[in-house]
Structures are given as structure tokens and as C-alpha cells.
Amino acid sequence: MANAEVLLQFLKQNGNIWCDDCLSDKTGITPRQQINQLGCRLAKTRKLFRNRGRCTGCGKTKITNSLNPEVSEANQIKQEMMIEPKSSDVGGVRPWYWEGNIQAVLASYLAKNEFRMMSIANTALRESGKDIEAITPEGKTLWISVKGWPEKSQNTQARHWFSQGIFNIILYRDESKDVELALAFPDGFPTYHNLTKRIKWFQELAKFKIFWISKEGLIRTE
Ligand SMILES: [Zn+2]
């Protein structure tokens, strides 16, 4: 069971959504098939989930492994979100603008740009806490609240998610005057672009960045 422990430990320390190939590279567990077998075994006992998603390491959309922090909590959220953690490889393909994909693309972009990743919340499980915590190349702490684009009642829901993001910024700024803060949204949705234009004054006041993540995985900041 030693390798399984190594695998779980890695996910605990490096956040979620990692493909088998990257996990094999990072943990040194070879061959890659062993990760696949371990992952499936751990998924059966509900220690982790195997779903399609965008890998934090390589950024490709494939079957990825995510830690299951607590089975009971997962059951509750399963109903709420209609995700199916039990069915290992049949999880539906999530659109590029799904929050988990936006988070994973941004996390791998930051990691490639010399940010040190401290934690990545499992958004599929609605894990509480900051969506991304990182240390900037200059050594400053960065907290990011990530929002996707909704698949249902899009404009109403989007306004709601946008407000949640802004409220996170308010609370984070209260928690610390010195940390760097950011929001992240999928690029190209007019609702988000219009709303950010209207809160420019607040962005200057609270000092936070906005990351826009495009369908192609390109990232620009504002
Ligand atoms: Zn990968």
C-alpha cells in the first residue's frame, strides 16, 4: 500500500486534478499503468475520484485524479451537483468554462511562471477555502477566487457567481492588507466583462487583479 500512500500524499500537497501521466512523473511511481491501477483501486474505496478534467500538470483534458476529502460530504455534494464520483471513467466531459477547468488552467499557468502553488481547492467538491493559494515570484502571497460560466440560467447565475467572487475579495482584504488578490473568469462572456467594467472603482480600492482565461487556454490579466 506504500505507493497508494505516496499518491494520496502527493494529491494532498499539490491540489487536485492530476492525470495518470503527470502523477507518474511527479511521484516516481512507474510504470504509468501502476498509477492507473492504484487510482482505480482508490476510486473504488472512494478515497479519490477519477473524472474527466483538465490536468493541473500538463493542461490536457483527460481522466484525472482528485482527492475525496470526505465520503459523507461527497455524497451530499453529489446530489447537489449531480456529479458521479463512483463511476470512475464515465464522468461527463465538462465544458472548458467549468470552474474546475478554469482553475486548473490558471494553476498550471502560474506554476509554469514561477509561482509556487500552496493549495488548490477541489472545486468539484465545493471544498471551502481559497480556490488557489500561491506565492508569487516576488515572494508575496496570492489568493485567487475562481469562477466558471454557468450551464443553466446563465446570466442570472453568472451575476450571482460574480457577486460571490467580489464578496470573497472583500473578506480576503479584511483578512490581510498585504496579500495579493485576484479573481479569475472565463474570457469572452459579455456579462462578466460588463460587470468588471462597472466595479473598476472597487478594483482600484481593494487592489486585486483579474485573470481572464480563454477557451484556448490563453491567459490575460487586467
Ligand atoms: Zn497531466
Image (cartoon, rainbow, N blue to C red):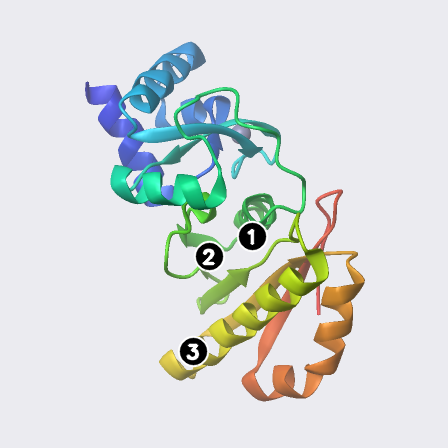
Q: Amino acid at mark 3?
A: Leu
Q: Which residue is mark 2?
A: 132
**Earlier sequence position, callout 3 versus callout 2:** 2
Identify the residue at image location x=50%, y=55%. 115
* Label 1 close to label 2 by CB (< 8 Å): yes
Where residue 173 sits in the image (x, y, percent)?
45, 80
Q: Nearer the viewer, residue 176 or 148?
A: 148
Where residue 119 sits in the image (x, y, percent)?
39, 52
Q: Which residue is mark 1?
A: 110
Where residue 44 sits in the image (x, y, percent)?
31, 20
* Label 3 close to label 2 by CB (< 8 Å): no
- Secondary structure under badge 3? helix
Where residue 30 sits in the image (x, y, percent)?
38, 14
Q: Which residue is mark 3?
A: 171
Residue extending furthest toward the left:
1
Question: Which quadrant would residue 197 be assigned to in this image?
Answer: bottom right
Query: Eyeballing the image, is 92 above or below 14?
Result: above
In the rendered image, is residue 3 in sight?
Answer: yes
**Earlier sequence position, callout 1 versus callout 3:** 1
On screen, residue 162 versus residue 217, left or right, reads: left
